[in-house]
């Protein structure tokens, strides 16, 4: 049954918030291109206007397109994007040492951005089709494998920041899809353990005056083999305890030991493939003054810009950090720093409220969704927005490592804007078709 509703009944809250953020984006992309002498040194704002307008067209087109079309096309969309990602490192344009872009001349696109939506739609279809079977290990691992495919292909570019988005989005979708908390906890714990064991030797090398025994074990192959042997024996005893006593204590001990045992060799492998600049980003996250004129420069200048804004800011086009070109990638990664410097705390609060409207309305639409696919698709898109927001804002104020993730709808870049607005179009399609069965 289909209840009669106007085709123009769209979520005006999301539309208003998105348009307001795009206007602010154009303003501060323009500001980022103005020098200390008042000259316009960059025409990026013109391209941003074009991307914003075309992105809005995409958003409204997807709003009025029945979201169930995405269910039927999810697998094809995903496979096409994976093929494109395979060819990107081979034929893509090199920017800042990475091949992330495909295009001709000045026109290019970043396929890894669109691949986020492709993964979200495929996972929404996969989990919605499995019903209660999502609770099984098999279904959970297959879903994880679908998320890992783009992660591996994006890391090959290499683009660590973008690759980081896929797994948290998968975890959110798996949670709302009905996955067991123990499965999610194991994956989350493993990620945290691998991250900790990966960066601990670098932190100890640059930030502590003396060597730590644990660090020596993590970096010496012979010592690591003995440690893994001991952990293997402990795991065997834990499994025996589960089998013969059925006590939950042994179950949780084995659970924790499994995470640690798997994380140690994975962390060793991660350290072997990390590049020098990625290592230093992880180090200066804790103390930017370790390398104030190198890897720590971005964080120091960004925190200076944000802190100097005060309650009301220095005024539009009156910022110093950006106009003296102290902020690298100031129209992309650190556009929030310019906004905070020129508009201050109250300007930041306005931006936060606009994002809160998008997050809140998206969660409300997820609640209204009439089918499982729609609900999971909205959950994944919302998770993508939230993760980008917290990582980007966090790195500009020094509480997150510099990853290169854009602030969706604000940072300069056509691929990120189109991806964000396409995602909102799908969310609003769920809202617009919420009365259809």
Image: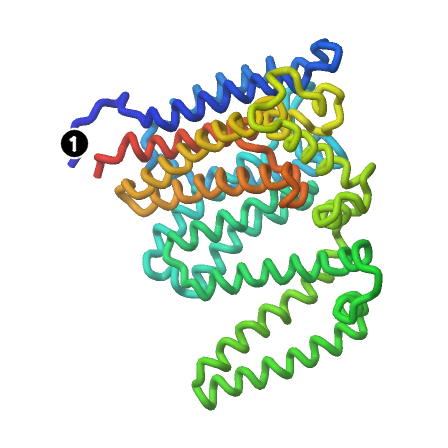
Type of colouring: rainbow
Q: Residue at x 48, y 22 (%)?
A: 55
Instruction: Inspect this view and state whether residue 246 appears.
Output: yes
> In percent of the image, x 55 and y 83: which residue is there?
238
For mark 1, what is the residue?
A: 3
The answer to whether residue 346 is above or below residue 45 is: below
Outermost residue on the front side: it is: 311
Examine the rendering and report whether any part of residue 333 can be seen: no
Residue 241 higher or lower than 336, as above or below: below
Count of numbered marks: 1
Task: Choose between 341 and 8: the one closer to the eye.
Answer: 341
Q: Locate residue 47, reporting x and y percent.
A: 60, 16
x then y, percent, for residue 273: 75, 53
- Quarter-wise, where is residue 190 in the image? bottom right
Measured as percent of width and height from the top left, residue 278 is found at 74, 46
Left or right of 363, for residue 402: right
Residue 105 falls in image quadrant: top right
> Local crowd at mark 1 within 10 Å, few (<14), some, or many (≥20)?
few
Image point (46%, 21%), residue name: 20
Above or below for 302 versus 242: above
- Percent x, y of residue 145: 53, 55
Determine whether, in the image, residue 38 is placed left or right of residue 162. right
At x 43% / y 60%, what residue is drawn? 139
Q: Nearer the viewer, residue 216 or 211?
A: 211
Q: Report helix, strand or loop for mark 1.
A: loop
Is 56 displayed left or right of 156 in the figure? left
**Image quadrant occupied by the N terminus:** top left
Task: State the quadrant of the C terminus.
Answer: top left
């Amino acid at each position: 049954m289909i209840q009669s509703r106007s085709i123009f009944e769209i979520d005006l809250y999301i539309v208003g918030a998105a348009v307001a953020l795009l206007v602010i984006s154009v303003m501060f992309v323009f500001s980022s291109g103005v020098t200390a002498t008042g000259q316009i040194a960059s025409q990026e704002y013109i391209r941003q206007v074009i991307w914003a307008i075309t992105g809005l067209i995409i958003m409204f087109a997807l709003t009025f397109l029945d979201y169930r079309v995405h269910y039927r096309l999810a697998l094809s969309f995903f496979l096409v994007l994976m093929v494109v990602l395979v060819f990107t490192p081979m034929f893509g344009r090199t920017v800042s040492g990475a091949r992330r872009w495909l295009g001709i001349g000045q026109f290019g696109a970043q396929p890894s951005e669109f691949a986020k939506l492709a993964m979200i739609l495929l996972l929404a279809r996969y989990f919605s089709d499995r019903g209660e079977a999502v609770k099984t290990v098999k279904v959970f691992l297959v879903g994880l494998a679908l998320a890992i495919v783009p992660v591996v292909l994006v890391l090959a570019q290499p683009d660590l920041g973008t690759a980081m988005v896929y797994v948290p989005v998968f975890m959110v979708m798996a949670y709302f899809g009905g996955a067991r908390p123990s499965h999610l906890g194991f994956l989350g714990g493993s990620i945290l353990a691998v991250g900790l064991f990966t960066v601990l030797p670098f932190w100890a090398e640059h930030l502590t005056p003396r060597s730590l025994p644990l660090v020596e074990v993590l970096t010496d192959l012979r010592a690591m083999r003995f440690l893994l042997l001991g952990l293997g024996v402990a795991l065997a005893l834990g499994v025996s305890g589960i089998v013969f006593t059925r006590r939950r204590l042994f179950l949780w001990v084995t659970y924790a030991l499994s995470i640690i045992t798997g994380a140690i060799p994975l962390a060793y492998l991660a350290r072997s493939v990390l590049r020098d600049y990625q290592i230093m980003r992880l180090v200066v996250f804790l103390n930017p003054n370790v390398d104030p004129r190198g890897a720590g420069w971005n964080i120091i200048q960004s925190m200076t810009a944000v802190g100097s804004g005060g309650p009301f800011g220095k005024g539009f086009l009156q910022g110093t950090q950006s106009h003296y070109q102290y902020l690298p990638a100031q129209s992309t990664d650190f556009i929030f720093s310019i906004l905070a410097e020129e508009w201050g705390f109250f300007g930041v609060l306005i931006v936060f409220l606009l994002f809160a409207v998008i997050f809140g309305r998206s969660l409300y639409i997820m609640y209204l969704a009439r089918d499982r696919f729609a609900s999971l698709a909205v959950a994944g898109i919302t998770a993508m927005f939230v993760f980008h927001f917290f990582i980007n804002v966090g790195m500009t104020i020094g509480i997150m490592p510099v990853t290169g993730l854009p602030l969706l709808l604000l940072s300069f870049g056509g691929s990120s804007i189109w991806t964000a607005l396409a995602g909102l179009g799908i969310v609003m399609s769920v809202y617009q078709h919420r009365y259809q069965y």
